[in-house]
Image: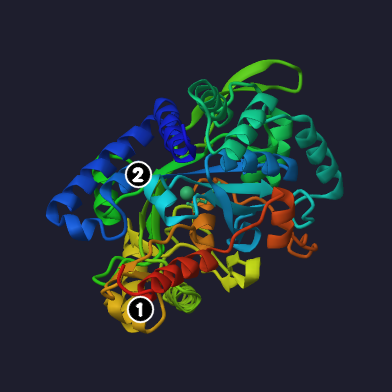
Amino acid sequence: MVTWELRAAFARSLSDMYGREVPAYTALLDVAHEVNSDVMAADPAAAQRLGSIGRVTAERHGAIRLGTPTELSQVARVFGALGMYPVGFYDLRDAGSSAIPVVSTAFRPVDADELARNPLRVFTSVLTPGDRRFFSADLQVRLEEFLGRRRIFSPDLLALSDRAESGGGLDATGAEEFLRLATATFELSPEPVDRAWYAELERVSAVAADIGGVTSTHINHLTPRVLDIDALYERMSARGITMIDDVQGPPRWDGPDLLLRQTSFRALAEPRAFRMPDGEIVLDSLRVRFGEVEARGIALTRAGRERYDAAIVEARERADAGGEPDAMAGAPRGGGVGRVGGVGGVGSVGAAGPVGAAGSAAAAHRQGILREIWARDFPRTEAELDSEGLAYFTYDAAGARTPIVYEDFLPASAAGIFASNLTDRGAKDSTQEAATLDADWLAGALGRDLLDPFDLYAAQSEASRARTDEGPR
Ligand code: OOG
Ligand code: NI
């Protein structure tokens, strides 16, 4: 299997595993397929403007949370075997009012043809035990000791990963073994959870407990892509699955799809074994795995992204000023400003939490505000987005333009996804000093270059211009 075949096989293997373990995910896939077939049937060309139906049907993103720079460098080798490289720096520590002590990147293919073959991406976060706003010096020491003792990636998996990356794939036997080991690494472990330790970390943040309270990691959601997220929202609700109140990101409107819209549902409590302080094992439950779905739009330039971020902030302020009830299911409130910072100045200001469609009157109100802002601030055609330098396109020899799909994430939406699955906001002491953890730190931890998403889109667009400048071929 060459690299992309291995990646596609891994995406299928993960999806099969998650479907076996989280039945609501299978329901979500069914509804996503229904919606996608309907959108395709109505207008196949429009439906595939941002990717072939083959790509969209196979498309997934997952999320994992790790504890240490070492684990991060190891997972980079596993994803390297799959042709997935770290793109973008997301600082979730300040992206919402919940205590989310992580910084993140996303592993994904970077070349357009690789993305077209299979666009699997994994949002990958690493815990920040050195950040005093979350962890005392004493807790940091015990946490780092605990994390230093665990081994998430087996030597066999890492050796196979290195072989696959340097050789551009694996033979049939190697591939089978790689897929088995890699998939098992991201399954939920049956290992009993140390109750007291988990609870101590939970008082800081449910995310800290999810990462540092156990000796393993797990995929916490696996997100399909849908061509009409509003239709999906309605059909999921009709099936009795309660979605969070909002579709996060841009509103539903009659102009071009921009960036990324996402919504999620809270997973059911799953049975887990706990080891009590006296050694007794008791059966209880944890909610650590959930469901999410997304619709992808056009990648915005830095100028377009600034306009987007400002629009989201304005919508939040206006909704808050309107005094409408805070009906958002666990969504972060208040001065949450997300950041994609660092790499060559990716650094624009993210938005303040989710504002979007769908569920309650409050959500409908927020949606109305967003639509008003969109009508005022964003052009209604791809041609204007292009001429105003707001979005990325490729061009063919005849000058026809094709939008470049947004392949990345949004910090405010990500914070909303984290927060929508927390029952408790945790504790963050903002009088303490933040640890300086930026894109350079993350690149060092990964032991690899951290790529800048804007640079990737710009390069793709410029390459298409260069090809057409060469004249007819
Ligand atoms: C990751 C949340 C971010 C998204 O789609 O924005 C994410 C997590 O919960 O670990 O997946
Ligand atoms: Ni997600």
Disc ID at residue 374: none
On whether ligand 2 comes within 8 Å of the CB at mark 2, the answer is: no
- Quadrant (top left/top right/bottom left/bottom right) for the C terminus: bottom left
For the question of whether residue 378 can be seen, the reply is no
Q: Where is residue 281 in the image (x, y as percent from the top left)?
A: 66, 16
**Lateral position of residue 422 relative to residue 374, left or right:** right
* Residue at mark 1: 386
Please report the residue visible at 31 percent of the width from the left and 65 percent of the height from the top. 364
Does 143 sit above or below residue 259? above
Label located before the other in sequence (1 or 2): 2
Quick one: which residue is furthest to the left in this view? 42
Query: Callout 1: helix, strand or loop?
Result: helix
Instruction: Between residue 3 and residue 109, name the one nearer to us.
Output: 3
* Residue at mark 2: 242
> In this rendering, which labeled residue sits more in front, label 1 or label 2?
1
Q: How crowded is mark 1: few (under 14 residues within 10 Å), some or many (20 or more)?
A: some
Please report the residue visible at 59 percent of the width from the left and 65 percent of the height from the top. 340
**Lateral position of residue 254 relative to residue 314, left or right:** left
- Amino acid type assigned to the residue bearing label 1 in the image: Asp
- Amino acid type assigned to the residue bearing label 2 in the image: Thr
State the colouring used for the structure image.
rainbow
**Lateral position of residue 168 relative to residue 400, left or right:** right
Query: Callout 2: helix, strand or loop?
Result: loop
Q: Where is residue 401 in the image (x, y as percent from the top left)?
A: 30, 71
Q: Do the residues labelled 1 and 2 touch (CB within 8 Å)?
A: no
Q: Where is residue 23 in the image (x, y as percent from the top left)?
A: 37, 29
Task: Name the quadrant containing residue 228.
Answer: bottom left
Instruction: Between residue 260 and residue 161, name the one nearer to us.
Output: 161
